[in-house]
Amino acid sequence: VDLSTKVAGLSLPNLLFNASGVCCQTETDLKLMIESESGSLITKSATYEYREGNPSPRYLPLPSGLGSINSMGLPNEGYEYYLNFAKNYDYSSKKPLFISLSGLSLADNVKMCEAFVAAELPCVLEVNFSCPNVPGKPQLGYDMEAMESALNVLAPLIKKPFGVKLPPYFDIAHFDTAATIFNKFDNLVYVTCINSVGNGLAIDFETESALIKPKDGFGGLGGLMVLNTALANVNAFYRRLPGKQVIGVGGVTSGKEVFLHVLAGASAVQIGTTLKEEGPTVFARINKELTDIMIAKGYKSLDEFRGKVKTL
Ligand SMILES: O=C(O)c1[nH]c(=O)[nH]c(=O)c1I
């Protein structure tokens, strides 16, 4: 059974990697990803300067076991740290490297993209339009005009194939509008769907308190509970972006959800909450589970069923 795939022209030995933000903020984290059975890795979204992020507790798995809530607040080492990591990365390692950028302004995104473009590295840039947890900064992904304006500046600047990380959309008209924008940019070769479902609220029954400290307890939701929204966003953009690819993320706890993401159209699949809770051994487990599912169903490669979800 062949779990390999191609994204943005790069070959991934298998389709699994981390969701940006999980197991990827420091070199220690990133080394764990390199040593894991993942097919690639992506760095924590970078801002121009180092950021401490929001006060803790800022991430928790939910007592229900159905997911997680986070309001990290974009903690990261600053973009130069990840530029340096990218300069020292062993690109002969077969594991492609993705770099996530989430500038607090278009000017910051421009400066960070210019620095990465100037370095002429084989890593793939992904612009994060969907961080839900920086107080006072609305998600660009929910402002269609602002997102198009940003892409009008960033796509020509990046020149090479790149991707964007999107928030979940919940209205067909939004899928249509967003896809129309993305189809204007030839080098925008993939979208990653979905980021966390923004601004949920987890309340503890006993203490009658919000679970996390930042933003009165409001934070992005992840894990199994967001699976069906994730599958919808993957399939909506798979149908609307001919010639482009979709990376699926949201709700992956086993090979079964990975299989569903590929059926919905995903070229690669990321793991967030389950990676955070289980650790990097999750990649070996889920690759094996997916292999067993494909053998049971008689599939030899991902191409045989990618995007082939049936309708009634
Ligand atoms: O709070 C965060 O750091 C964060 N949390 C998320 O759930 N998604 C994001 O893109 C980010 I940048």
Image (spheres, rainbow, N blue to C red):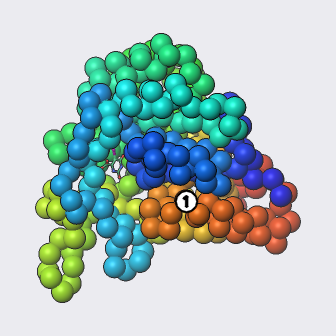
Say what secondary structure mark 1 lies in.
Answer: loop
Label 1 sits on what residue type?
Pro
Q: Is residue 27 above or below residue 224?
A: above
Return the x and y of residue 67 as percentages of the image width and height: 40, 69
Residue 30 in the figure: left or right of residue 93: left
In the picture, the quarter occupied by the C terminus is bottom right
Residue at screen point 21% across, 79% down: 204
Mark 1 close to ligand 1, CB under 8 Å:
no
Up the image or down, 45 lies above or below 207; here it is above
Task: For label 1, count other residues whose C-alpha is less than 10 Å away and answer few (under 14), some (14-19) or many (20+).
Answer: many
| Residue 48 visible in the picture | yes
Residue 65 x %, y %: 41, 77
Residue in view at x 43 percent, y 32 percent:
82
Viewer-closest of 312 and 161: 161
Front position in the image: 166 or 39: 39
Q: Residue 180: percent from the left, percent from the top?
A: 49, 32
Q: Residue at x 44, y 27 (%)?
A: 83
Residue 247 seen in the figure: no
Please provide percent x and percent y for residue 173.
Answer: 42, 45
Q: How many marks?
A: 1
Q: State the residue at coordinates (44%, 36%).
A: 100
Q: Picture quarter containing residue 59? A: bottom left
Residue at numbered disc 1: 280
Q: Looking at the rendering, in which quadrant would you find the N terminus?
A: bottom right
